[in-house]
Image: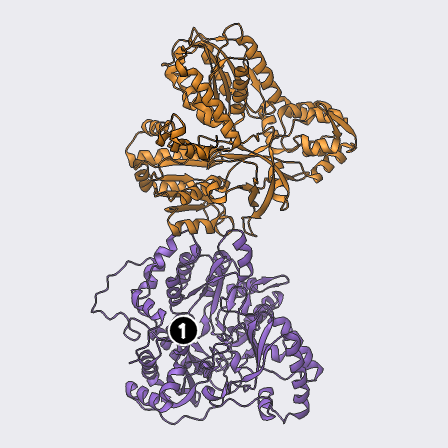
Amino acid sequence: MLLKELSSLASPLSATQVDKLKQLTSELNAVQLAWVGGYLAATAELSGVAGEVQQAPQQTITILYGSQTGNGRGIANELADKAQAQGYSVNLVSMADYKTRQLKQETLLLAVVSTHGEGEAPDDAIELHKFLASKRAPKLDALNYAVLALGDSSYEFFCQTGKDFEQRLSALGAKAIVPLTECDVDYESAATQWQEAVLGAVKPLVGTGASVVSIGGASTTTTGSSFTKQKPYSAELLASQKLTGRDSDRDVRHVEIDLGESGLSYQVGDALGVWFSNSDALVTEILEGLKLDGEAEVTLGDATLTLSQALKEKRELTQLYPGLVQNWAQLSGNSELQAISEDREQTRQFVLKHQLADLVAKYPVDIGAFQLVELLRPITPRLYSIASSQSEVESEVHLTVALVEDERESGTRFGGASHFLTNAQEGAEVKVYVEPNNHFRLPENPDTPVVMIGPGTGVAPFRAFMQERAAQGAQGDSWLFFGNPHFEQDFLYQTEWQQYIKDGTLTRLDSAFSRDQAHKVYVQHRILERGETLWQWIERGAHLYICGDAERMAKDVHQALVKVIKQHGGKSEEQAEALLESLRSDKRYQKDVY
Amino acid sequence: MSDQKLSVNEYLKTDSNYLRGTIEEGLDTSLTGAFNDADQQLIKFHGFYQQDDRDLRNERKEQKLEPLYSFMLRARVAGGVCTPKQWLGVDKIASTLTSSNSIRLTTRQTFQYHGIPKRNLKTLIQDLDREALDSIAACGDVNRNVMCNPNPVESKLHQQAYHWAKKLSDNYLPRTKAYAEIWLGDDKVAVSESEEVEPVYGKTYLPRKFKMAVAVPPDNDVDVYTNDLGFIAVAEDGELVGFNMVAGGGMGSTHGEVATFPRLGDDFGFIKAEDCLKFAEAVLKVQRDWGNRSDRKQSRLKYTIVKHGFEAFKAEVEKRAGVKFEPKREVVIGDRGDRYGWIKGVDNNWHLTLFIEGGRIKDLPGQPLQTGLREIALVHKGDFRMTANQNIIIAGVAEEDKAQIEAIARSHGLMGKLISPTRGHSIACVALPTCALAMAEAERYFPDFMTKVEALQEKHGFLEQPIVIRMTGCPNGCARPFAAEIGLVGKAPGRYNLYLGASFEGTRLNKLYRENIQEAEILAALDELFARYVKEREAGETFGNFTVRVGVVKAVIDAAKDFHG
């Protein structure tokens, strides 16, 4: 039956229900409809429609994920799919949405959690992480568990959050069914192995039966399209327009991509994953430096391709990892590099400031084509906060991309994806997928005020917010804090903000241009200056958003917010922190930092 | 009373609370580098204009950036005289608070800064104030910077003339405290209704800008007839006794609007020196009351005199001044150029006039002009005098200090280049890229153009003969193009109207000869005219007079009738 023809006469639904269903289905594409169909069938089965006797409750596998960039969520999703395929009943849920009270009742818990920054838990795992370490955490003698930790070994506290989970669950009396698995940036094969191991270990513990997916995290499991990280959509680049003035010392681009008929949809706050290829110049430099023949054939998995192709399309050339530095030190026999590679902190610093091409130039090695390809990690896509709303740009997606560019001894080094996007010509092919971010969402109520703190390219999602709010005709006040080095050169999207101020979509904008005066001024200084008003906004229920640099900005801004709450809210340091914490758990304080 | 609607600016002035407007709010917003439309008019009274880099407009639009706004601030320096200490302050400001990193000498004996971002305005004005300099009324509908022949040779006469120029400048400054409050942070004083804030100007100031100059014959470097009000010094035995007053001059006009025209001042007669302020105030007040406030293109004093007639206007001025004009005295109106190089004054001090091309003092490769003047200011004991030809005089140098000053000037490219007489007599306005009014290049293009003219003069064998050539990017006339023997007024990029026939001394306007032509056509026309000139000129006949005598253009006697006719 076509949906258009659906009416209450021909169905068991009321007229209102039919309207609601029509409304919902009209918003869905084919893939979504199929998914909803499956979901409803499963639900019907569970609720015992048509007088069937309700089945005995199955032992449920709870799968939790705490994810910053979406990798953890992806692994958890896959695991849930595999478990269901094997007939298990599964409760898949984000740690952010997980009720800690529930923990006592669990018998089987599988956790996937990443670590970001200096050993910190991702936003959606903060609360659970804290709870497990607190006195309130219950005894968990009946619990079986397994933890998969995601991390980046170039950071000092590699996989720390995963280690914490493992340690705490074990200390509370729970039994590990498989040992903690730590995954580095190239996590795919280790994660797959862990999934297999876990499912194998689960078998003797749990009976199979009707499978149920809790929709606690359902909205996060679908992007409304079949395109994924592994199967990205080949989109067309519409424009890569420089946003910074000709005298700026940075190159920031406004990138427009056409999602065409892909059916890819996104919400404001989401990120776009972008696959890229390395530049020909970089590949040539590396080949020449290593005296390797680009036409040599290499085998990757079951594909055979030329070394040039492999380096350009398949291997990570612009980010080093500690293992590579260690191997290179051995290969080169260079004592300086060996000394660096033996010291964790020095390696970490080295990795941040060098690329493969620097290694090639500075520490010559004798290496074969296959050996090189084996040594390098697979290329990984980069995530960019989306700078547009589909209610404004429809099938387009916009990004704000800063060209990563460093002058080094052996030449200028560029960030892989930003260089690719900056140099891409109109009409170029870009492989993309949507990475949802449910922890960076506008308030549901359009009347709720929002405070958006987004210096540099951190301003991107706020452009999306403004487009969305303008389209909604939202009445809520909005306040943007923006910062960059120079007013004349680096005021990203200046004319758009002027328009939004003029038409009332944006209520106020405070900017900090750090290098336009003798002393440096950043957004946190503006926040302090406007503290009194900001506190009034918080009291009025404003949602706070921070986007941009995690290393320094987000921390400085957090400290500024604490000060504002202390000074104008008459609170102690602890109370101010507690208030921000409660705002965070109420989804009124959200971060998209990197 | 006219029942015509007042021009928008009149309402702005009325509502501005004596020029305050919302300038302070405009300074506070960091969303834009600009002021709102109303304040853009008011800031002129405070001495600066909003501009933007027109070369970058389209590029920045694509970058989602607003135009590259900045401000041009013009200081008020009566008679163009400042001390070495003041110069050092002026120089430092240029280097630290402007993006143009230059000082631009103007055709009205003052200097301008270009490329001041909004956020630096306050600091800049405070820094100027520290040097006892300001920009009050350097622009706007008020009496602008008063010019005065800077001739240091006749030092005594100059001193006496300068005394009156300074008085004219000080007396007709706006009295509002807006400038001090906004820029210098002075306390705000509530103004009662009954209080007379502006005794001369009133709440709405003048209908339009107003320019005054004091000339000391035989020099006419200040181009006295192009001013709204001019005073030509009359001396007896080397002492100033009074002035021949002239009024009703002005350059500005609009392409294609014949109701607008440039005009030279009328001679009104002789006045005693001590009556100078009485007459000046009378003229200002008649213009204040009679001037056109409905149409800003008809509001300069020249139109007021044309509309009411010379005699009626003169009678009203005499009535208000309470003094009558005497018949004008015979004076010689001579050269409008500067005398480059060293000249010894009657007091035995030496004076060095430096040619500054385009008035632009900037450190250029091989010619660190700005540094050179700074070095001079550090050792100089006399003063600096900015000239009406955008040059600078190092005035009052003792015999024993001459060599040191000259050495600095030479090593910094300020001296030593051969300047042809024509180049030395010629000026260009700023125009592109900063001036919002410009339709074509002037300052950036003029030096190359002059080289081509020099080549033509050389070809025809009269390179030693000065011709006054002036180029502006628009017909508003900052470089007084309609009083040039060869006037070039921008119409569109690369295109100019060519005007001919003004007198060398600035006592007769020029007239349109060719419209909307490009460089090749301009040079071809000049080539032909130069050929005729060398063949047919009479002894001592200047190029401007020649073109009128042989009928290349008709003489402009009564501008209202002849300029377009």
B256 or B377: nearer the viewer: B256
Q: Residue at x 50, y 44 (%)?
A: A393
Residue most extreme to the front = A9
- Residue A486 percent location from the top left of the image: 49, 49
Q: Which chain is orange?
A: A
In the rendered image, the vertical position of residue B501 relative to residue A328, given as above or below: below
Is residue A179 shown left or right of residue A565? right
- Front position in the image: A123 or A485: A123
* Colouring rule applied to residues: by chain
Residue B447 x %, y %: 62, 71
- Which chain is disc 1 placed on? B
- Give the crowd class for mark 1: few <14, some 14-19, many >=20 residues within 10 Å: many
Identify the residue at image location x=21%, y=65%: B192
Count of all numbered marks drawn on residues in the image: 1
Quadrant in which residue B233 is drawn: bottom left
Whether residue B423 is situated above or below residue A343 in the rendered picture: below
Return the x and y of residue A271 as percentages of the image width and height. 51, 34
Compared across the picture, whether A322 is left or right of A61 comes to: right
Q: Residue at x 78, y 28 (%)?
A: A297
Q: Residue B365 sits in which quadrant?
A: bottom right
Q: Colour of chain B?
A: purple
Q: Is residue A363 left or right of residue A347?
A: right
The quadrant of the image that shows the N terminus of chain B is: bottom left
Residue B459 visible in this rendered orientation of the protein: yes
Q: Amino acid at mark 1?
A: Arg
In the rendered image, which quarter is residue B469 located in? bottom right
Q: Secondary structure at mark 1?
A: loop
Q: Measuring from the top left, give residue B138's x and y in whole percent.
A: 41, 69
Which residue lies under the disc numbered 1?
B144
Whether residue B418 is visible:
no
